[in-house]
Amino acid sequence: MLTVIAKGKKIEEALKITNEGVAEALGGLPKNKLDCPNIAATALHKAIKNYKEKNKLIENKEIEIKECTIREKDIDSKSRANLSPEEVRRYLRQIIIPEIRGEGQEKLLNSKIFIKAKKVEMISLLLFYCAAMGIGEIYYNTDDENNSLEKSIINHAKDINPELKIEKSSGVENLDIEIFFGSPNYIEKLIDNKKTETNNKIYAVIGNWKGFITSKMPSKNITSEINSKEIIKEGLVLSSSFSSSFAATQVIKKIIGFGEISEKPYYFNLWNMSFGEQINLQVNDKNKKQNLNNKSCLIVGCGGLGTPAAFILSQLGIGKLGLVDDDTVELSNLNRQILHSTSKIGKEKVFSAKKNLEKLFPAVKVNSYNTRFNEKNASDLLESYDIVIDGLDNLNTRYILNDKIQKTNIPYIHAGALALYGQVTTIIPNRTPCFECIFPENIRNTRALSCSETGILGPVTGLMASIQVAEALKILNSNKGSLEGKLLFVDLTINYIQKMEIELDKNCKYKDE
């Protein structure tokens, strides 16, 4: 995201950019705050190398770095492998990631996984992302009878990618990955019935707002740390969404064979936004029974971030949901934009998302705005909503959004995602640094790399959206987010999630408003 400082520079000049330079562009951050690979200068150097390798267009070192959009015709033979033209179009945004490419996509298409959970709604995002990314055979088993919600979820997963096999089954042989998903007590029962342990397992243990992921069989004393005396729907939905997205990335890394896999339990606490092998698991949720029926949220952008955010909010029972986008559904969207599906290709995104949400959650009230968010319509779009979730993919529109929310005093949850990286922060007018404090105006007219150039792995956006919704829920109910004045960085290549403090720019033009 921050490599926009390289735009217009020659290759030789770009390769001289250092972490100190990135820190300066961020407004004078300490260099030691830049150890996360998605903002470090080394990531820029790697991106340049990958760009040269993938496109083989840069032979002269004097050529400038310019905007480009990678399309099907630009994909070289190594990235295509044995994929059909339609498969290249469908998985384009992930096969341009160097760790995946065509060979990795072929592995996914030839793979077979099994998911065991108590209820299908707990693993809905996991099913959607595994289908979206092209896992060839997806089997699942739940304790549910075939209820209407399960049928709707499975039908939607099949429509995301009709070429795959998605079936309910009590057991399957020759699996690449098995995923066990549920509460501590549920996982303990499954462990008691397992006689052998292999290295193709993923365990997702969830509680209210918290849980952990591991590829090794957890012990009972570990699962007890996640137990909750009382099940809270909101906390459980958010834990399920986060764990589904996190587990999906681990599935892909295991099958293809890249990045780090969590053998030790990787804990998360969405209440205080703590992540790692040793964290504070306490949840001080005073407003346990949280009512969202009278709350509203506007999601600007119905793509990789906006669609999972809309799904989770609908699952939580948000009173009113607004969706803003002027784009239409394309085949290349479907590796990550999980509210869209194959049958909706060519349809307006806001109507595709609204239609699928209403099928999954008939009680949800969705307002769709088939328009681009801009300076002229921003105030009208914002006026009837309590909070805004950023699902945008460009800087200029984010500056417009930032300006309008500062003037209308509406809380705003920003997120961005590229490849396997992401970032999230909570912006509250007159209380926290604004978007321009973090990304100064001197980069307003530049353009950050997008997923059309660097690629994006679908569940990364789901994980970021889970964090956005968790923050939105806390603000809607208690007026206090865990990421106020903090920027959360995510690198799912190495399972790194870390917060850093951000400060109000002393010259911020909104500080006295």
Image (spheres, rainbow, N blue to C red):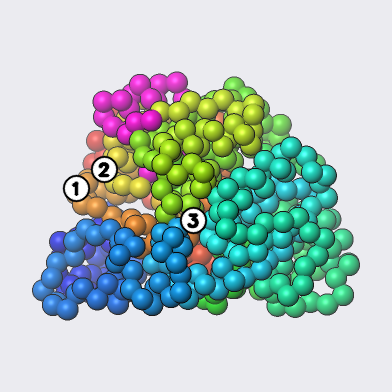
Q: Could you say whether the residue bearing mark 3 is in a helix, strand or loop?
A: loop
Task: Check whether the beta carbons of the residues at disc 1 and disc 2 lie within 8 A of each other.
Answer: yes
| Kind of residue at disc 2 | Asn
Residues drawn in magenta: 370-392
The residue at which mark 3 appears reads as 335
Mark 1 falls on what kind of element?
loop
Q: In this view, does 223 lie above or below 106?
A: above
The residue sitting at 57% across, 35% down in the picture is 357
Q: How far apart are marks 1 and 2 (CA)?
A: 7 Å
Front disc: 3 or 1:
3
Locate residue 118, reporting x and y percent. 79, 51
Classed neighbour count for the residue bearing mark 2: other residues with Cα under 10 Å, few (<14), some (14–19), many (≥20)? some
Q: Which amino acid does label 1 sit on?
A: Asn
Q: Residue at x 26, y 43 (%)?
A: 396
Q: List the residue tagged with mark 2.
A: 396
Task: Tell me: 461 left or right of 451.
Answer: right
Residue neighbourhood size for the residue with mark 1, other residues' Cα within 10 Å, grouped as few (<14), some (14–19), many (≥20):
few
**Quadrant in which residue 40 is drawn:** bottom left
Give me the disc on residue 45: none
Choose the circle earlier in sequence order: 1 or 2: 2
Q: Return the residue at label 1.
A: 445
Marks 2/3: CA distance? 25 Å
Tell me where residue 469 sits by quadrant: top right
Say which of marks 2 and 3 sits in front. 3
